[in-house]
Image (cartoon, rainbow, N blue to C red):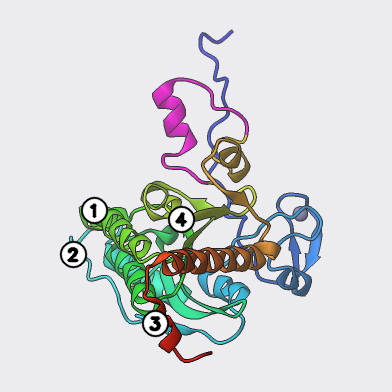
Amino acid sequence: MAWFKKDKKPIQPPADKSRVPEGLWVKCPSCSQIIYNKDLAESLSVCTKCAHHFRLSASERLKTLFDGEWQVYDEGLRSTDPLSFTDTKPYRQRLEASISATGLQDAVITATGPIAGLRCSVAAMEYGFIGGSMGVVVGEKITRTIERAISERLPVIIISCSGGARMMEGALSLMQMAKISAALARLDRARLPYVSVLTDPTTGGVTASFAMLGDVNIAEPKALIGFAGPRVIEQTIRQQLPEGFQRSEFLLEHGMLDMVVDRRELKDAIARFLRFSAASAATARAVPAAAAIAPLEARADEPAS
Ligand SMILES: [Zn+2]
């Protein structure tokens, strides 16, 4: 008999099963249903049997949201590798590999375009680019998205899909948390709405800053949302975590989110919120105007509309 027995199985590296694989048919990792690729595309990459949400790229995401044409901004911005960082391989090499794999210069696409007839300023994060991590470029592009919204009076929608701040840019990437949060505070003072959409996964510095600052925080079903990973938390607090911990439904139940919405209804949910906030803004403007004491003569002089 052995003195020591290993109770736990060794940890297996997770297979990247969220992304829709190439080919004509796709097997759902959740219910093992075989789905025709075109059917999957029609249902916005949601399994028609069990509603498993496959991960979307940033450009696919924009396609699901906008009504038609949209304009992309700051496409040419790219990281300069400010720390000349090297881990198992140089950061520059990682950047080059991600640029050729995704066709993007960094982990976010920013654009303006119509959503249900309302022009919006949108940022969608790309998980395929170094885990959707937030470096200087992502921070700058999202900040500009918000500033554009303020100057043109547009609502902001940010779709998070990120592993958090980008380690290879050190403290500079952490500073993006404050920069974006400050821009969101200015957006709030300008009384413009911000919808945060949290998709699988939204973790680290992104959760700890702008992803949780929405006027409304909407998550996709069963998305992993958290700051530190569950294993780190378990080791720190020395307790077993409850079932479904750090998933959208659990967070909704505990008051961290406002809504969990199926991707096929997401656009309608966003449009409903934007119309609601536009209506309440109009009411807020109308009330002080009506209460203002204006001389009766001045009103009588106004041309009848
Ligand atoms: Zn399924």
What segment is highlighted magenta in the picture? Answer: 225-243
For the residues labelled 4 and 2, say whether their Cβ atoms are less than 8 Å apart.
no
Question: Residue 97 lies in magenta, yes or no?
Answer: no
Question: Residue 240 lies in magenta, yes or no?
Answer: yes
Bin the neighbour count of mark 1 within 10 Å (Cα to Cα): few under 14, some 14-19, many 20 and up: some
Q: CA distance from mark 1 to mark 4?
A: 26 Å
SS at mark 4?
Answer: loop
Nearer the viewer's eye, disc 4 or disc 3? Answer: 3
Bin the neighbour count of mark 4 within 10 Å (Cα to Cα): few under 14, some 14-19, many 20 and up: many
SS at mark 1?
Answer: helix
Nearer the viewer's eye, disc 1 or disc 4? Answer: 4
For the residues labelled 1 and 3, say whether their Cβ atoms are less than 8 Å apart.
no
Q: CA distance from mark 4 to mark 2?
A: 30 Å
Q: Which residue is mark 1?
A: 170
State which tag comes first along the sequence, 4 or 3.
4
Ligand 1 has an atom within 8 Å of the beta carbon of the residue at disc 1: no
State which tag comes first along the sequence, 1 or 4.
1
Judged left or right of residue 89, residue 297 is right
Q: Which residue is mark 2?
A: 82
State which tag comes first along the sequence, 3 or 2.
2
Looking at the picture, which amino acid does disc 4 mark?
Gly
Q: CA distance from mark 2 to mark 1?
A: 9 Å
Residue extending farthest to the bottom is 303
Location of residue 201 with respect to 130 vertically, above or below: above
Residue 41: x percent and y percent?
Answer: 71, 72
Nearer the viewer's eye, disc 1 or disc 3? Answer: 3
